[in-house]
Image: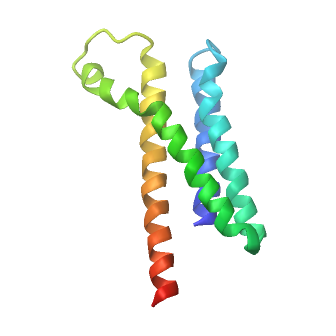
Amino acid sequence: MASFTVRIGILLVVFGVASYVMTGGASVTAFIPSVIGALLAVCGLVAVRNEAARKHAMHAAVLIALIGFIGTASALLRIPDLLNGAAVPRRPALIARASMAVILLVYVVVSVKSFVDARIRRKG
């Protein structure tokens, strides 16, 4: 799970940089996925390199991802407008926020499943 966290972190860093470049550097807020991704990658690296800190690092990573998802989830509600061709202000930002929300939601779900599986293995 720690290596998955590092990969998701790197994906978000690249996604944030790409968002910034593709919007012509219109706003530094395009780097928000990069910040979240860097934090996830650091948590994943701590978990990989320090067995004693693994549990705490992974829980911190899921908390960061959950906060990131909560902050971007409202963009998912605007996707139907986007798909129907309605005039949506700041279209690239909406697409980036919705994409980040989906990536983080998948990460949180996979992480929670991993935590549950680990607990079952310990008890069984």
Residue 26 placement (x, y as % from top left): 61, 12
Q: How is the image coloured?
A: rainbow
- Name which quarter of the figure residue 14 lies in: top right
Residue shown at 67%/63% (left/top)?
56
State whether residue 115 is above or below residue 41.
Answer: below
Most distant residue in the right direction: 50
Residue 113 placement (x, y as % from top left): 43, 66
Give the side of residue 105 with respect to residue 29, left or right.
Answer: left
Count of number-bearing discs? 0
Residue 120 placement (x, y as % from top left): 44, 81
Give the side of residue 105 with respect to residue 13, left or right.
Answer: left
Most distant residue in the front direction: 123
Give the side of residue 68 with respect to residue 21, left or right.
Answer: left
Judge by depth and name the residue closer to the eye, 3 or 52: 52
Residue 58 placement (x, y as % from top left): 62, 61
State whether residue 31 is above or below residue 58.
Answer: above
Quadrant of the rendering where the N terminus is positioned: bottom right
Judge by depth and name the residue closer to the eye, 24 or 51: 51
Most distant residue in the bottom direction: 124
Residue shown at 54%/46% (left/top)?
65
State whether residue 22 is above or below residue 14.
Answer: above
Residue shown at 49%/61% (left/top)?
111
Judge by depth and name the residue closer to the eye, 31 or 68: 68
Quadrant of the rendering where the C terminus is positioned: bottom left
Residue shown at 44%/71% (left/top)?
116
